[in-house]
Image (spheres, rainbow, N blue to C red):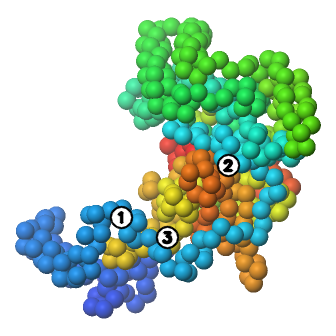
Amino acid sequence: MGSNTSKTQSQHDDNDTPYYNEKNGLLSEEEDATTSRLRGLNLSEYSTEKGKEGGAISVTTLDSWEAELLADPKNKLAQNAFGNGSVLLAITDSSNEVKLRQQYFFNVEVQTIGSPSFLNNQKSSGRCWIFATSNVMRAHVIKKYNLKDDEFQLSQAYLFFYDKLEKSNFFLDNIIDTVDEDLDSRLVRYLFQGPQNDGGQWDMIVNLVNKYGVVPNEFFPDNAQATATSTLNYVVTEKLREFGLILRDLAKKGHSKSKLIEVKASMVKEIYKVIALLLGTPPKPTDKLVWEFKDKDGTYKYFETTPLDFYKTHVEYDASVRFSLIHDPRNDFGKLYTVDRLNNISEGKPIEYVNVDIKTIKNIAIKMLKDNEPIFFGSDVGKFNQRETGVLDVKAFDYNLGFGTNLNIDKLERLKTGSSQMTHAMVITGVHIDPLTNEPVRWKIENSWGDQVGKKGYYMMTDEWMNEYVFQIVTAKKYVPKDIYNVWKAKQFNVLPYDDPMGALA
């Protein structure tokens, strides 16, 4: 499914043998990707011990490697630096050129956004996707009611509670659906490996807000277990594994599917009890609430509402008409993808991705920012991340300076080999466009790690980092070309396997 867009590698016949050039390494008459990567490798020496099958490493070889390594004083300096402190700090480029590239200056920014300092720290939890959603939605409430940036936030714990409950139900439904599979089948092992976790995807948000709505933070604030979810996850995961085995055993003994569903309902009730004891009991989607506030001018207002009404009436952000664009160079652009067995709510809307090139994603993102629309996006945040300064920059660390070798693996190859996937959701709130080239240079990000990292909670990513490590943005019809919107509306899905990197939960 989809085309393979990996780098073309030249094929040589028996008479077309690559030759070794002492200066540049392995070369051929027509250099290809593999040949380029072999530059600098001295393939004529130390490759294997002569006469040995499999190329075992001998003591003689180790002696030679050690002598060559330590003959260069810079390598001893590197050993000292790495042995006494942070490797990344030692190889961080601190030149003026880099500092200029990484400055927090943007000529396009959304006008209204909540404060990153106010109730915007996911702490020891994997709820970034819920925080990113809350930060996008609260911007609309703040603007609508003229609220102070640092006095309004939506309840992340509210959505988290119902997501945990729904994911547990979804897992048990999957177990019932696969009772005829062997326990050690690849699929069943995959299901039991991760019955539920903190992470999620955009369409899971759509499922949650359409069923449960949202509430201001004061109606269900974080508690100790919401901000440190390891115990919650351990108990719920182990109970789900236990329940899954029971359901499989009942099926093996000949009980009907309707009986399994009946038993499952009692199991979900048990899971509800565990979650409620740890997180507290949130409002139900139709519970009556009274929302009170003072706006920037000090004017007091109140509304009688419910979680569902608050989402529809006061947020005025219809998540169901927003959809995900992804950049996945493994697969065809201009097609709609989903992932097998990926969801949080049984019979909920599927995960939907329209695959496009990265240039299209950038153009659409710029349109949104110019329209004062903050952008939910997913990325592989752990790569080339300077956490303290909040800088995401592929040129931030000079691996060649430290190790004498670069990391030469591109986005497509990282996806193919399991090196990269969506690990974190954040919000794009600005971009700096070069006035001479009219091209984006760097992007402003609102993160959910509190205001002690980055620039008071904001991050900056370079445009090059976006090319390599951004996989997704969420957008709407008004910002995309007609053909892209039509792909999403047609619902002609290409189904990726359940363990595909695009199934990673941010």
Residue at the spot x=28%, y=73% of the render? 78
Residue 187 position, x and y percent, is 46, 34
Location of residue 316 by image quarter: top right
Q: Of helix, strand and loop, which one carries label 1?
A: helix
Q: Is residue 325 left or right of residue 44?
A: right
In this view of the protein, can residue 414 be seen by the observer? yes
Residue 447 position, x and y percent, is 62, 51
Residue under circle 3?
Answer: 396
Q: Marks 2 and 3: in contact by CB < 8 Å?
A: no
Please state which amino acid type lies under the numbered disc 1.
Val
Residue at the spot x=55%, y=34% of the render? 227
Residue 12 position, x and y percent, is 37, 80
Q: Which mark is residue 116?
A: 2
Q: Nearer the viewer, mark 3 or mark 2?
A: 2
Residue 266 vs residue 270, the one in the foreground: 270
Residue under circle 1?
Answer: 87
Mark-to-mark CA distance, 3 and 2 = 24 Å
Mark-to-mark CA distance, 3 and 1 = 13 Å
Please state which amino acid type lies under the numbered disc 3.
Ala
Residue 344 position, x and y percent, is 62, 31
Which of the two discs, 3 and 1, labels the residue nearer the N terminus? Answer: 1
Residue 245 vs residue 71, the one in the foreground: 71
Please state which amino acid type lies under the numbered disc 2.
Pro
Q: Is residue 60 left or right of residue 220?
A: left
